[in-house]
Image (tube, rainbow, N blue to C red):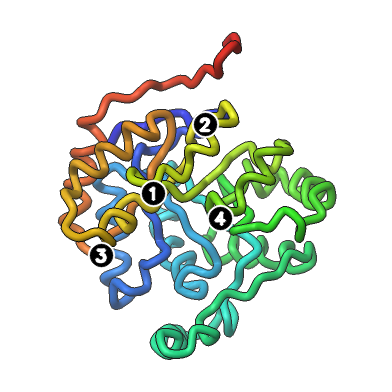
Amino acid sequence: MRQVILPGTDMLISRFSFGTASLFSVGSGKRRANLLASAYDHGFTHFDTAPYYGFGTAERDLKPLLAAHPDITVATKVGLYSPGGEAQPETAVFLRKAAGRMVSALSRPTIDWSLARARESLEESLRRLGRERVDLYLLHEPERELLDTDEWLRWLESERDRVVRFGIAVDSRRLKPFLSAPGPLTSVIQTLDSIGDREADIVEQHHRPLQITYGYLRAAQRNGAVDVQALLAAALRRNQYGSVIVSTRKPERLKQYAAVADSVDGATTFTPKGAAQ
């Protein structure tokens, strides 16, 4: 699969990233492992996860793949945590998720922006992933007013031996305050986007390229049947410099995604208007 240097970084990233938010719904641990291995075999070299995904199981599922392939880059997150914690057995995860369809509070994430919890979370994520460093560490749906930005920056800078890069993973509703007062926390922005509503236009309006975007298929599927290949090709043309997160429960879809990625030509370097490179 075609790769690019993520704008504003030296990070080599596949044009499609594999998202693990719904990985637990694939089924057994063996099926999940086979799906992740197949994604790598089809050229996915970047995987997106979080402690909240599968209530800790997504990070654990990635551990064998990351051990086998040190070239993989991984993003995990901080700030949203699992109800019941990230160490609960898979049976408990299944029951909590099933019950959460009827009583949303049972599966709703716990929000905690204290540095004490963040320090603990980083340690736990690295242990579940089986790595000494995380390539990209993202604040998960942060609210600007809830963050002591200077305090967080001092902590993240102090973790440079374990955190290569950091940024934010946030939808467009929460993004504007961060773009209005840019800083190191927004060196990488992962955000929701769609072809119809173009939520990520706000990033480009601040003279920045799209870096990592997601949500294209889900948004289109709300309106009925979707030509997946055409839609994802359009997503790559829209995010021409970075990476688009996709996921699937079906291994056969991965070959289709790889073919789309290699069929869409994209620019490799972003130059802001009026700037010299």
The answer for how far apart the CA atoms under marks 4 and 3 are is 26 Å
Q: Nearer the viewer, residue 168 or 125?
A: 168
As measured in the structure, the alpha-carbon distance from the residue carrying label 4 to the one carrying label 2 is 34 Å
- Disc 1 marks a residue whose amino acid type is Ile
Residue appearing at x 66%, y 61% in the figure:
122
Instruction: Calculate the distance from the C-alpha at mark 1 to the C-alpha at mark 3.
Output: 14 Å
Residue named by callout 3: 249
**Residue drawn at (29%, 71%), measured in percent from left and top?**
26
Q: Nearer the viewer, mark 4 or mark 2?
A: 2
- Image position, residue 197 (x, y; %): 39, 46
4 or 3: tag closer to the N-terminus: 4
| Foreground: disc 4 or disc 3 | 3
Q: Amino acid at mark 3?
A: Arg
Rounded to the nearest whole Å, what is the CA distance between mark 2 and mark 1?
18 Å
Residue 51, image x, y percentages = 55, 67
147 shown above or below 112: above
Give SS at disc 2: helix
Residue topped by disc 2: 204
- What label does residue 245 carry, if any? 1
Mark nearer the N terminus (2 vs 1): 2
Considering the numbered disc 3 on the image, is that residue within a helix, a strand or a loop?
Answer: loop
Q: Nearer the viewer, mark 3 or mark 2?
A: 2
Quarter of the image with the C terminus in it: top right
Of residue 69 and residue 123, the one placed in the foreground of this image is: 123
